[in-house]
Image (cartoon, rainbow, N blue to C red):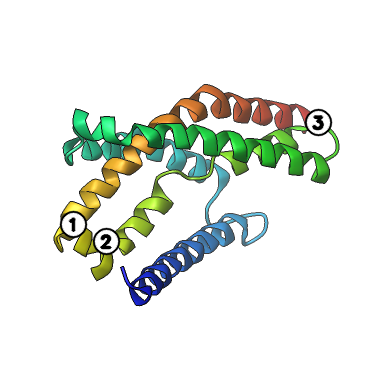
Amino acid sequence: MSMTGVVSVMLNSLSAMARVTLVSLVGVLCALYPKGDPLLSPAFLKQIARISTQVFLPALVITSLGSGLTLQLLSQLWILVLFSVIISIVSFVIAETVGRLIVREDTPLRAGLAVCVCFPNSTSLPIMILQSACKQNEVKAEFNDDRDECMAAAMSMLFVYGIGWSFLFWGYAKGALQQCAVASEVRE
């Protein structure tokens, strides 16, 4: 890939990140404003989160499994599971260290901060970036100019990466977030 191609892919990825940031910003503003009666109430946000994890996430898993994920591909991509665990552990250590500097007391806020830094969104953001990347001629060239083949490979890699992430998130982070919620309710 030429330098021009690399710059083009980087700019396209940056554009995808800008779109995600803009959409996220709109969501945050709708969850905060107008003060006292936001457009997206906490109860509504909780329902959306439940729909995402109980409907959309399983649909994404089924789609990934049906898009060419084979035992041979899993054997080639196993390193992604290891990377997801390593990345999560390193992120947690950094988040815990920085959290101790920012929030000196051992509070639910510090624990929640560490979990949120350690376990950012593992699917939606990468999917948007991968969709954008698979539109690039330089990336499509690696897949015989077939955008669908590129997306199938990308989704398979994302699914395999998500195995390690899901193991850590559902094994540790969910419980930690529930403890934060209980502790914050007790403080109120």
> Position of 184 compared to 158: left or right?
right
Residue 136 visible to an observer of this rendering: no
Q: Find disc 2 in the rendering and name its residue.
A: 134
Q: Residues within 10 Å of mark 1 (few under 14, many from 20)?
A: some
- In the image, residue 91 lies at what x, y percent? 61, 40
Q: Nearer the viewer, residue 96 or 142?
A: 142
Query: Gap between marks 2 and 3, in whole Å?
Result: 44 Å
Residue occupying the point 66% across, 25% down: 179
Q: Nearer the viewer, residue 5 or 108?
A: 5
Q: Amino acid at mark 3?
A: Asp
Element type at marker 2? loop
Query: Gap between marks 3 and 1, in whole Å?
Result: 50 Å
Residue occupying the point 56% across, 24% down: 172
Checking the image for residue 106, the label placed there is 3
Element type at marker 3? loop
Q: Are marks 2 and 1 in contact (CB under 8 Å)?
A: yes
Quadrant where the C terminus is found in the figure: top right
